[in-house]
Amino acid sequence: MKNDRAQFVTKTGVIAATVGSAVGLGNIWRFPFEAGVHGGGAFLILYVICVLLIGVPVVVAEFVLGRGTHANAKGAISQLVPGTWMRWMPLLGVLASVLILGFYSVVAGWILAYLYMAVTGMMSGHTPQEYGTMFGEFVSNPWLSTMCTILFLLINYTVLRRGVQKGIEKIANILMPLLFLILVVFCVNSLLMDGAGKGISFLFNPDFSKITPSVVVGAMGQAFFSLSVGLGCLLTYASYFNDKTPLVKNAFTIGALDTLVAILAGVMIFPAVFSFGMSAEAGPKLVFEILPSIFQHLPMPILWSSAFFILLFFASLTSTISMSETCIACFVEELKMSRKKATMLNTAICIVLGVLCSLSFGVMSSFTICGKTLFDLFDFVSSSILLPVGGIFFSLFVGWVVDKKFLDDQLTSNGEGKMSNWVKMPMMFCIRFVAPISIVLIFLVGLGILSF
Protein backbone atom coordinates (compact mmCIF):
# COMPACT_ATOMS: atom_id res chain seq x y z
CA MET A 1 0.00 0.00 0.00
CA LYS A 2 2.87 2.36 0.75
CA ASN A 3 4.32 1.93 -2.70
CA ASP A 4 1.27 2.74 -4.81
CA ARG A 5 -0.27 5.39 -2.56
CA ALA A 6 -0.28 8.98 -3.78
CA GLN A 7 2.49 11.27 -2.54
CA PHE A 8 3.37 14.93 -2.77
CA VAL A 9 6.14 15.16 -5.33
CA THR A 10 7.92 18.40 -4.34
CA LYS A 11 9.19 19.96 -1.12
CA THR A 12 7.40 23.20 -1.92
CA GLY A 13 4.21 21.22 -2.49
CA VAL A 14 4.49 19.72 1.00
CA ILE A 15 4.89 23.14 2.61
CA ALA A 16 2.28 24.88 0.45
CA ALA A 17 -0.37 22.20 1.03
CA THR A 18 0.16 21.92 4.79
CA VAL A 19 0.38 25.69 5.31
CA GLY A 20 -2.74 26.03 3.16
CA SER A 21 -4.50 23.57 5.44
CA ALA A 22 -3.59 25.64 8.50
CA VAL A 23 -4.14 29.12 7.04
CA GLY A 24 -7.81 30.00 6.87
CA LEU A 25 -10.33 32.70 7.61
CA GLY A 26 -9.49 32.47 11.32
CA ASN A 27 -6.02 33.91 10.65
CA ILE A 28 -7.50 36.92 8.89
CA TRP A 29 -10.61 37.75 10.89
CA ARG A 30 -10.19 36.00 14.26
CA PHE A 31 -6.57 36.87 15.10
CA PRO A 32 -6.97 40.68 14.73
CA PHE A 33 -10.10 40.56 16.89
CA GLU A 34 -8.44 38.39 19.56
CA ALA A 35 -5.39 40.65 19.57
CA GLY A 36 -7.66 43.70 19.69
CA VAL A 37 -9.66 42.63 22.74
CA HIS A 38 -6.65 41.11 24.55
CA GLY A 39 -4.21 44.00 24.48
CA GLY A 40 -2.38 43.83 21.17
CA GLY A 41 1.37 43.29 21.63
CA ALA A 42 1.14 41.31 24.86
CA PHE A 43 -1.34 38.93 23.28
CA LEU A 44 0.90 38.54 20.22
CA ILE A 45 3.85 37.44 22.37
CA LEU A 46 1.69 34.93 24.25
CA TYR A 47 0.28 33.68 20.97
CA VAL A 48 3.73 32.99 19.52
CA ILE A 49 4.73 31.15 22.71
CA CYS A 50 1.55 29.05 22.56
CA VAL A 51 2.17 28.17 18.91
CA LEU A 52 5.59 26.82 19.94
CA LEU A 53 4.40 24.98 23.05
CA ILE A 54 0.99 23.71 21.92
CA GLY A 55 0.46 24.09 18.17
CA VAL A 56 3.75 22.81 16.77
CA PRO A 57 3.94 19.75 19.09
CA VAL A 58 0.44 18.61 18.08
CA VAL A 59 1.34 19.19 14.41
CA VAL A 60 4.37 16.93 14.97
CA ALA A 61 2.11 14.33 16.60
CA GLU A 62 -0.22 14.28 13.58
CA PHE A 63 2.74 14.18 11.19
CA VAL A 64 4.23 11.18 13.00
CA LEU A 65 0.99 9.22 12.74
CA GLY A 66 0.33 10.12 9.10
CA ARG A 67 3.80 9.64 7.63
CA GLY A 68 4.52 6.61 9.77
CA THR A 69 1.49 4.67 8.54
CA HIS A 70 0.77 6.24 5.13
CA ALA A 71 -2.91 5.89 5.93
CA ASN A 72 -6.00 7.98 6.63
CA ALA A 73 -6.71 9.07 10.20
CA LYS A 74 -8.70 5.97 11.21
CA GLY A 75 -6.40 3.65 9.29
CA ALA A 76 -3.34 5.11 11.02
CA ILE A 77 -4.62 4.35 14.51
CA SER A 78 -5.93 0.94 13.40
CA GLN A 79 -2.45 0.02 12.16
CA LEU A 80 -0.77 0.99 15.41
CA VAL A 81 -3.29 -0.39 17.91
CA PRO A 82 -5.49 -2.83 15.95
CA GLY A 83 -8.66 -4.05 17.59
CA THR A 84 -8.78 -1.38 20.31
CA TRP A 85 -11.42 1.28 20.93
CA MET A 86 -8.87 3.95 20.04
CA ARG A 87 -9.15 3.17 16.32
CA TRP A 88 -12.58 4.82 16.30
CA MET A 89 -11.43 8.12 17.83
CA PRO A 90 -10.21 9.67 14.52
CA LEU A 91 -13.76 9.38 13.16
CA LEU A 92 -14.59 12.29 15.46
CA GLY A 93 -12.18 14.33 13.33
CA VAL A 94 -13.93 13.17 10.16
CA LEU A 95 -17.26 14.18 11.69
CA ALA A 96 -15.82 17.55 12.72
CA SER A 97 -14.50 18.10 9.20
CA VAL A 98 -17.94 17.46 7.71
CA LEU A 99 -19.64 19.78 10.19
CA ILE A 100 -17.08 22.53 9.64
CA LEU A 101 -17.43 22.17 5.88
CA GLY A 102 -21.17 22.61 6.35
CA PHE A 103 -20.96 26.09 7.87
CA TYR A 104 -17.54 27.15 6.53
CA SER A 105 -18.72 26.68 2.94
CA VAL A 106 -21.59 29.08 3.65
CA VAL A 107 -19.15 31.82 4.64
CA ALA A 108 -16.98 30.94 1.62
CA GLY A 109 -20.08 31.29 -0.54
CA TRP A 110 -20.65 34.76 0.86
CA ILE A 111 -17.06 35.59 -0.05
CA LEU A 112 -17.63 34.44 -3.63
CA ALA A 113 -20.70 36.65 -3.90
CA TYR A 114 -18.89 39.67 -2.47
CA LEU A 115 -15.96 39.03 -4.80
CA TYR A 116 -18.36 39.25 -7.72
CA MET A 117 -19.91 42.43 -6.32
CA ALA A 118 -16.47 43.94 -5.73
CA VAL A 119 -15.21 43.19 -9.24
CA THR A 120 -18.38 44.57 -10.86
CA GLY A 121 -18.35 47.74 -8.74
CA MET A 122 -21.59 46.93 -6.94
CA MET A 123 -19.93 47.52 -3.56
CA SER A 124 -18.76 51.03 -4.30
CA GLY A 125 -20.15 54.19 -2.74
CA HIS A 126 -22.01 52.81 0.28
CA THR A 127 -22.02 53.96 3.91
CA PRO A 128 -21.10 51.60 6.78
CA GLN A 129 -24.78 51.34 7.67
CA GLU A 130 -25.65 50.43 4.10
CA TYR A 131 -23.03 47.66 4.12
CA GLY A 132 -24.67 46.25 7.23
CA THR A 133 -28.09 46.33 5.59
CA MET A 134 -26.70 44.83 2.39
CA PHE A 135 -25.12 41.94 4.27
CA GLY A 136 -28.26 41.22 6.28
CA GLU A 137 -30.42 41.16 3.15
CA PHE A 138 -27.96 38.93 1.30
CA VAL A 139 -27.57 36.20 3.95
CA SER A 140 -31.32 36.05 4.53
CA ASN A 141 -32.00 35.56 0.82
CA PRO A 142 -32.42 31.76 0.57
CA TRP A 143 -31.67 31.52 -3.13
CA LEU A 144 -28.59 33.71 -3.37
CA SER A 145 -26.85 32.42 -0.26
CA THR A 146 -27.64 28.78 -1.05
CA MET A 147 -26.49 28.97 -4.66
CA CYS A 148 -23.22 30.63 -3.64
CA THR A 149 -22.60 27.87 -1.08
CA ILE A 150 -23.18 25.18 -3.71
CA LEU A 151 -20.97 26.99 -6.23
CA PHE A 152 -18.09 27.12 -3.75
CA LEU A 153 -18.41 23.42 -2.96
CA LEU A 154 -18.38 22.59 -6.67
CA ILE A 155 -15.12 24.54 -7.04
CA ASN A 156 -13.79 22.56 -4.08
CA TYR A 157 -14.91 19.34 -5.81
CA THR A 158 -13.19 20.32 -9.07
CA VAL A 159 -9.83 20.52 -7.31
CA LEU A 160 -10.26 17.38 -5.23
CA ARG A 161 -11.37 15.12 -8.04
CA ARG A 162 -7.97 15.63 -9.71
CA GLY A 163 -6.26 13.88 -6.83
CA VAL A 164 -3.31 14.63 -4.56
CA GLN A 165 -0.64 15.69 -7.04
CA LYS A 166 -2.66 17.23 -9.88
CA GLY A 167 -5.30 18.73 -7.60
CA ILE A 168 -4.27 19.47 -4.02
CA GLU A 169 -0.53 19.99 -4.51
CA LYS A 170 -0.87 21.93 -7.77
CA ILE A 171 -3.50 24.35 -6.50
CA ALA A 172 -1.59 24.89 -3.22
CA ASN A 173 1.57 25.76 -5.15
CA ILE A 174 -0.41 28.43 -7.00
CA LEU A 175 -2.66 29.85 -4.29
CA MET A 176 -0.32 30.10 -1.30
CA PRO A 177 2.32 32.34 -2.94
CA LEU A 178 -0.48 34.53 -4.30
CA LEU A 179 -2.08 34.72 -0.85
CA PHE A 180 1.18 35.92 0.72
CA LEU A 181 1.73 38.39 -2.12
CA ILE A 182 -1.73 39.95 -1.72
CA LEU A 183 -1.25 40.16 2.05
CA VAL A 184 2.10 41.94 1.65
CA VAL A 185 0.60 44.44 -0.81
CA PHE A 186 -2.20 45.21 1.65
CA CYS A 187 0.31 45.62 4.47
CA VAL A 188 2.39 48.10 2.47
CA ASN A 189 -0.76 50.09 1.74
CA SER A 190 -1.81 50.05 5.41
CA LEU A 191 1.62 51.24 6.52
CA LEU A 192 1.18 54.33 4.34
CA MET A 193 -2.05 55.35 6.11
CA ASP A 194 -2.23 58.22 8.59
CA GLY A 195 -3.03 55.95 11.52
CA ALA A 196 -0.33 53.39 10.73
CA GLY A 197 1.86 54.37 13.66
CA LYS A 198 -0.89 53.85 16.23
CA GLY A 199 -1.94 50.56 14.67
CA ILE A 200 1.57 49.14 14.53
CA SER A 201 2.33 50.32 18.06
CA PHE A 202 -0.80 48.62 19.34
CA LEU A 203 0.13 45.34 17.64
CA PHE A 204 3.83 45.22 18.48
CA ASN A 205 4.27 47.31 21.64
CA PRO A 206 3.36 44.96 24.52
CA ASP A 207 1.63 46.17 27.65
CA PHE A 208 2.26 43.29 30.04
CA SER A 209 -0.12 44.75 32.63
CA LYS A 210 -2.95 43.58 30.37
CA ILE A 211 -1.99 39.92 30.69
CA THR A 212 -4.69 38.09 32.62
CA PRO A 213 -5.73 34.42 32.77
CA SER A 214 -8.39 35.09 30.12
CA VAL A 215 -5.76 36.61 27.80
CA VAL A 216 -3.54 33.55 28.27
CA VAL A 217 -6.43 31.19 27.50
CA GLY A 218 -7.36 33.33 24.49
CA ALA A 219 -3.82 33.03 23.13
CA MET A 220 -3.84 29.28 23.74
CA GLY A 221 -7.14 28.89 21.92
CA GLN A 222 -6.06 31.00 18.97
CA ALA A 223 -2.80 29.03 18.62
CA PHE A 224 -4.66 25.72 18.74
CA PHE A 225 -7.47 26.60 16.34
CA SER A 226 -5.27 28.56 13.94
CA LEU A 227 -3.19 25.51 13.00
CA SER A 228 -6.26 23.31 12.37
CA VAL A 229 -4.97 20.51 14.56
CA GLY A 230 -7.24 17.86 16.04
CA LEU A 231 -9.16 17.20 12.82
CA GLY A 232 -6.70 14.80 11.24
CA CYS A 233 -6.17 17.10 8.24
CA LEU A 234 -2.43 17.36 8.84
CA LEU A 235 -2.27 13.63 9.61
CA THR A 236 -3.89 12.93 6.24
CA TYR A 237 -1.55 15.28 4.40
CA ALA A 238 1.45 13.76 6.20
CA SER A 239 0.37 10.35 4.91
CA TYR A 240 1.31 11.70 1.45
CA PHE A 241 4.83 12.69 2.59
CA ASN A 242 7.77 10.59 1.45
CA ASP A 243 9.86 8.86 4.09
CA LYS A 244 12.62 11.47 3.96
CA THR A 245 10.42 14.48 4.70
CA PRO A 246 11.75 16.18 7.88
CA LEU A 247 8.69 16.23 10.14
CA VAL A 248 9.85 18.48 12.96
CA LYS A 249 11.43 21.02 10.61
CA ASN A 250 8.25 21.16 8.54
CA ALA A 251 6.10 21.50 11.65
CA PHE A 252 8.10 24.54 12.77
CA THR A 253 7.93 25.96 9.23
CA ILE A 254 4.15 25.60 9.17
CA GLY A 255 3.84 27.17 12.61
CA ALA A 256 6.05 30.08 11.53
CA LEU A 257 4.24 30.72 8.24
CA ASP A 258 0.79 30.38 9.82
CA THR A 259 1.82 32.87 12.49
CA LEU A 260 3.26 35.17 9.81
CA VAL A 261 -0.12 35.23 8.04
CA ALA A 262 -1.85 36.18 11.29
CA ILE A 263 0.68 38.95 11.97
CA LEU A 264 0.39 40.25 8.40
CA ALA A 265 -3.39 40.28 8.83
CA GLY A 266 -2.90 42.41 11.94
CA VAL A 267 -0.56 44.75 10.06
CA MET A 268 -3.16 44.98 7.29
CA ILE A 269 -6.12 45.67 9.58
CA PHE A 270 -4.99 47.67 12.64
CA PRO A 271 -3.52 50.69 10.77
CA ALA A 272 -6.69 50.80 8.67
CA VAL A 273 -9.14 50.69 11.58
CA PHE A 274 -7.09 53.22 13.58
CA SER A 275 -6.93 55.53 10.57
CA PHE A 276 -10.69 55.56 10.12
CA GLY A 277 -11.78 55.32 13.74
CA MET A 278 -13.27 51.83 13.51
CA SER A 279 -12.74 48.61 15.45
CA ALA A 280 -11.31 45.24 14.44
CA GLU A 281 -14.43 43.25 15.22
CA ALA A 282 -14.56 39.51 14.63
CA GLY A 283 -16.23 37.51 11.93
CA PRO A 284 -18.64 38.72 9.27
CA LYS A 285 -18.91 42.29 10.52
CA LEU A 286 -15.20 42.92 9.97
CA VAL A 287 -15.10 41.26 6.56
CA PHE A 288 -18.42 42.24 5.04
CA GLU A 289 -19.10 45.62 6.65
CA ILE A 290 -16.08 47.36 8.24
CA LEU A 291 -13.28 46.67 5.74
CA PRO A 292 -15.45 47.26 2.62
CA SER A 293 -16.32 50.64 4.12
CA ILE A 294 -12.62 51.43 4.63
CA PHE A 295 -11.79 50.46 1.04
CA GLN A 296 -14.12 53.20 -0.19
CA HIS A 297 -11.74 55.79 1.27
CA LEU A 298 -8.79 54.45 -0.73
CA PRO A 299 -7.81 55.22 -4.32
CA MET A 300 -9.20 52.55 -6.69
CA PRO A 301 -11.67 51.04 -4.17
CA ILE A 302 -12.77 48.39 -6.68
CA LEU A 303 -9.21 47.08 -6.91
CA TRP A 304 -8.73 46.89 -3.12
CA SER A 305 -12.13 45.30 -2.49
CA SER A 306 -11.55 42.72 -5.23
CA ALA A 307 -8.05 41.88 -3.98
CA PHE A 308 -9.33 41.46 -0.43
CA PHE A 309 -12.06 39.00 -1.35
CA ILE A 310 -9.67 37.12 -3.62
CA LEU A 311 -7.40 36.80 -0.56
CA LEU A 312 -10.26 35.42 1.52
CA PHE A 313 -11.32 33.06 -1.27
CA PHE A 314 -7.81 31.58 -1.47
CA ALA A 315 -7.66 31.15 2.33
CA SER A 316 -11.06 29.47 2.49
CA LEU A 317 -10.43 27.16 -0.49
CA THR A 318 -7.11 25.76 0.77
CA SER A 319 -8.72 25.04 4.16
CA THR A 320 -11.82 23.31 2.78
CA ILE A 321 -9.68 21.22 0.44
CA SER A 322 -7.73 19.80 3.41
CA MET A 323 -10.86 19.11 5.46
CA SER A 324 -12.47 17.41 2.49
CA GLU A 325 -9.37 15.28 1.90
CA THR A 326 -9.59 14.01 5.47
CA CYS A 327 -13.04 12.63 4.67
CA ILE A 328 -12.20 11.43 1.15
CA ALA A 329 -9.11 9.49 2.25
CA CYS A 330 -11.20 7.77 4.91
CA PHE A 331 -13.96 6.90 2.40
CA VAL A 332 -11.44 5.53 -0.10
CA GLU A 333 -9.40 3.42 2.30
CA GLU A 334 -11.96 2.36 4.88
CA LEU A 335 -15.03 1.97 2.65
CA LYS A 336 -13.03 0.84 -0.41
CA MET A 337 -14.56 3.50 -2.66
CA SER A 338 -12.98 4.94 -5.78
CA ARG A 339 -11.63 8.46 -5.38
CA LYS A 340 -14.25 9.77 -7.81
CA LYS A 341 -17.14 8.29 -5.82
CA ALA A 342 -15.61 9.33 -2.51
CA THR A 343 -15.20 12.92 -3.71
CA MET A 344 -18.77 12.99 -5.01
CA LEU A 345 -20.08 11.58 -1.71
CA ASN A 346 -18.14 14.14 0.33
CA THR A 347 -19.41 16.97 -1.87
CA ALA A 348 -23.01 15.73 -1.72
CA ILE A 349 -22.94 15.54 2.09
CA CYS A 350 -21.40 19.01 2.33
CA ILE A 351 -23.96 20.48 -0.07
CA VAL A 352 -26.84 19.15 2.04
CA LEU A 353 -25.32 20.45 5.29
CA GLY A 354 -24.21 23.69 3.65
CA VAL A 355 -27.70 24.41 2.33
CA LEU A 356 -29.21 23.77 5.76
CA CYS A 357 -26.65 26.07 7.42
CA SER A 358 -27.24 28.71 4.76
CA LEU A 359 -30.97 28.63 5.40
CA SER A 360 -30.28 29.18 9.12
CA PHE A 361 -30.07 32.89 8.32
CA GLY A 362 -33.40 32.93 6.49
CA VAL A 363 -36.31 30.53 6.31
CA MET A 364 -34.83 28.16 8.93
CA SER A 365 -33.72 30.86 11.37
CA SER A 366 -36.45 29.83 13.83
CA PHE A 367 -35.33 26.18 13.78
CA THR A 368 -32.98 25.72 16.72
CA ILE A 369 -31.45 22.89 18.70
CA CYS A 370 -30.44 23.74 22.27
CA GLY A 371 -31.09 27.37 21.40
CA LYS A 372 -28.71 27.34 18.43
CA THR A 373 -29.37 27.49 14.70
CA LEU A 374 -27.79 24.72 12.65
CA PHE A 375 -25.00 27.08 11.59
CA ASP A 376 -24.16 27.94 15.20
CA LEU A 377 -24.66 24.35 16.38
CA PHE A 378 -22.23 22.93 13.81
CA ASP A 379 -19.72 25.63 14.75
CA PHE A 380 -20.06 24.94 18.48
CA VAL A 381 -19.95 21.12 18.30
CA SER A 382 -16.94 21.06 15.96
CA SER A 383 -14.91 23.93 17.43
CA SER A 384 -15.69 23.60 21.13
CA ILE A 385 -15.99 19.81 21.45
CA LEU A 386 -14.64 17.70 18.58
CA LEU A 387 -11.47 19.66 17.77
CA PRO A 388 -10.22 19.82 21.37
CA VAL A 389 -11.03 16.15 21.91
CA GLY A 390 -9.09 15.29 18.74
CA GLY A 391 -6.11 17.41 19.79
CA ILE A 392 -6.02 15.81 23.23
CA PHE A 393 -6.25 12.32 21.73
CA PHE A 394 -3.49 12.77 19.13
CA SER A 395 -1.06 14.30 21.63
CA LEU A 396 -1.70 11.67 24.32
CA PHE A 397 -1.61 8.84 21.78
CA VAL A 398 1.77 9.86 20.36
CA GLY A 399 3.13 10.81 23.78
CA TRP A 400 2.11 7.73 25.71
CA VAL A 401 0.85 4.93 23.44
CA VAL A 402 2.97 4.90 20.27
CA ASP A 403 5.93 2.50 20.28
CA LYS A 404 9.20 4.29 21.12
CA LYS A 405 11.08 2.87 18.11
CA PHE A 406 8.26 3.88 15.75
CA LEU A 407 8.35 7.39 17.20
CA ASP A 408 12.14 7.68 16.96
CA ASP A 409 12.09 6.39 13.37
CA GLN A 410 9.59 9.06 12.36
CA LEU A 411 11.29 11.91 14.18
CA THR A 412 14.58 11.05 12.46
CA SER A 413 13.01 10.13 9.08
CA ASN A 414 14.02 6.49 9.50
CA GLY A 415 17.58 7.40 10.38
CA GLU A 416 18.04 9.78 7.44
CA GLY A 417 18.13 12.76 9.77
CA LYS A 418 19.21 13.54 13.31
CA MET A 419 17.38 15.03 16.24
CA SER A 420 19.25 16.55 19.14
CA ASN A 421 18.01 15.73 22.62
CA TRP A 422 17.82 19.49 23.13
CA VAL A 423 14.96 19.45 20.62
CA LYS A 424 13.49 15.99 21.23
CA MET A 425 13.11 16.18 25.01
CA PRO A 426 11.25 19.53 25.12
CA MET A 427 9.14 18.43 22.13
CA MET A 428 8.09 15.19 23.84
CA PHE A 429 7.43 17.04 27.10
CA CYS A 430 5.09 19.40 25.26
CA ILE A 431 3.34 16.53 23.44
CA ARG A 432 2.89 14.52 26.64
CA PHE A 433 2.03 17.25 29.12
CA VAL A 434 1.85 20.86 27.94
CA ALA A 435 -0.35 20.36 24.87
CA PRO A 436 -2.99 18.02 26.35
CA ILE A 437 -3.31 19.99 29.60
CA SER A 438 -3.60 23.27 27.68
CA ILE A 439 -6.20 21.85 25.29
CA VAL A 440 -8.23 20.49 28.22
CA LEU A 441 -8.25 24.04 29.59
CA ILE A 442 -9.38 25.40 26.19
CA PHE A 443 -12.04 22.67 26.10
CA LEU A 444 -13.45 23.55 29.54
CA VAL A 445 -13.51 27.26 28.76
CA GLY A 446 -15.19 26.61 25.40
CA LEU A 447 -17.94 24.63 27.12
CA GLY A 448 -18.43 27.34 29.71
CA ILE A 449 -17.44 25.01 32.55
CA LEU A 450 -14.47 27.21 33.42
CA SER A 451 -14.27 30.97 33.17
CA PHE A 452 -11.86 33.73 34.13
Image: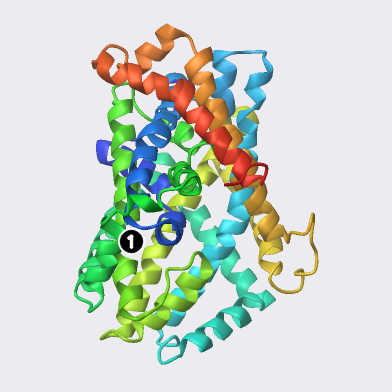
> Residue 73: x percent and y percent?
55, 29
Numbered circles on residues, count: 1
For image coordinates 70% across by 68% down, the residue present is 359
Q: Nearer the viewer, residue 226 or 217?
A: 217
Residue 328: give x, y in percent of width and height.
Answer: 56, 40
The residue under label 1 is: 266
Q: Residue furthest front?
A: 209
Query: Residue 327's quadrant in the figure?
Result: top right
Q: Quadrant of residue 60?
A: top left
Report the amino acid beneath label 1.
Gly
Q: Is residue 207 above or below residue 364?
A: above
Q: Residue at x 46, y 47 (%)?
A: 212
Give the camera-side residue of 362 and 10.
362
* Image coordinates for residue 56, horizontal then vertical, percent: 38, 33
Q: Taking the image as drawn, is residue 338 in sight? A: no
Q: Position of residue 250 (x, y in %)?
A: 30, 33
Q: Is residue 388 above or below residue 60?
A: below
Q: Residue at x 40, y 53 (%)?
A: 210
Helix, strand, or loop for circle 1?
Answer: helix
In the visual, does 322 lie left or right of 134? left
350 or 35: which is nearer to us? 35
Residue sticking out furthest to the bottom: 125
Q: Quadrant of residue 266?
A: bottom left
Colour scheme in use: rainbow
Q: Evaluate whether residue 93 shows in this view.
A: yes
